[in-house]
Amino acid sequence: MRTVLLGAPGSGKGTQGKKLSERFGIPKLSTGDALRAAVAGGTELGKQAAPFMNAGKLVPDQLVYGIVEERLGQADARKGYILDGFPRNVAQAQVLDAMLARLQQPALESAVHLHVDDEEIIRRLLERAVQEGRHDDKPDVIRHRIEVYNAETHPLLAFYQAQGKLKTVQGTGTIDDIFQRVVAAAGG
Ligand code: AP5
Ligand code: MG
């Protein structure tokens, strides 16, 4: 399985990606998790990324390419992988295709779009704010993340549709029911 999970903030990319990784024994790469680890570790990358993340903006593309190429270049990713939160705009999607060619890996197989309406997204993220205290789960930042998704990431649906790779699944319901849909959509 070589798939990317697409969807608005809070649509369940991390939740479903983890389950796919466990079921299929392939790595999941979340650029958001990697960036948060860099921020927590106080690295140069983390210092550059933090202001963008806290404001709910995308970090500059160049900051994420190194993370992705390094991870996809590791031996365990040759069997397959799940991408969560990358690519996030059309430029990143084009770079991903070039990167896979450079690593002599097969092309991406599918892009699974988790469709969840804004009301449910806001409900989930406000709940997570209480439980986990993620810095970007604040009402005004959540609103901006949704705007950024609509402006920059949503165009990827058409990009992958044109390649015949897009599968949209309903992202509401129980986590297990959604997982069945995601597995079917990703061709697992
Ligand atoms: P990132 O970490 O990718 O955040 P995001 O896209 O905003 O998405 P989330 O992680 O909030 O949600 P999710 O879809 O993973 O949902 P989850 O499973 O957690 O990015 C953060 C920031 O990093 C960006 O804003 C940007 O600054 C930067 N960044 C990252 N990648 C980048 C890139 N490629 N380029 C540039 N910048 C980048 O679920 C959400 C909540 O809902 C959880 O609490 C979960 O338990 C709950 N939940 C899940 N499923 C269900 C369900 N079925 N029913 C009820 N609740 C559910
Ligand atoms: Mg996530």
Image (cartoon, grey):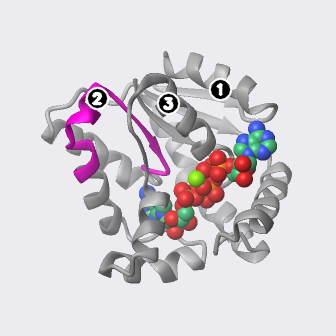
Q: Is residue 11 left or right of residue 73?
A: right
Name the residue at 80% across, 67% down: 130
Q: Position of residue 55 (x, y in %)?
A: 60, 79
Question: Which residue occupies the foreground of this view, 120 or 14?
Answer: 14
Q: Position of residue 140 (x, y in %)?
A: 75, 76
Quadrant of picture, ligand 1: bottom right
Please rate how many residues cluster around mark 3, counting C-alpha atoms within 10 Å: few if below 14, some from 14 to 19, many from 20: few
Element at label 3: helix
Mark 3, mark 1: which one is toward the viewer? 3
Q: Position of residue 69 (x, y in %)?
A: 24, 51
Q: Is residue 115 visible?
A: yes
Name the residue at 33% across, 68% down: 63
Callouts 3 and 1 close, C-beta under 8 Å: no
Callouts 2 and 1 close, C-beta under 8 Å: no
Tag of residue 107: 2
Question: Which residue occupies the foreground of this view, 94 or 76?
Answer: 76
Q: Which quarter of the picture shows residue 78? A: top left
Q: Amino acid at mark 1?
A: Phe
Q: Is residue 150 above or below residue 144?
A: above
Please rate how many residues cluster around mark 2, counting C-alpha atoms within 10 Å: few if below 14, some from 14 to 19, many from 20: some
> Mark 3 highlights which residue?
22
Segment tinted magenta in the rendering: 70-87
Q: Position of residue 75 (x, y in %)?
A: 20, 36
Mark 2 or mark 1, earlier in chain: 2
Q: Is residue 45 left or right of residue 10?
A: left
Question: Which residue occupies the foreground of this view, 108 or 125?
Answer: 125
> Mark 1 highlights which residue?
179
Callout 3: CB less than 8 Å from ligand 1: no
Element at label 2: loop
* In magenta stretch: residue 102: no
Mark 3 or mark 1, earlier in chain: 3
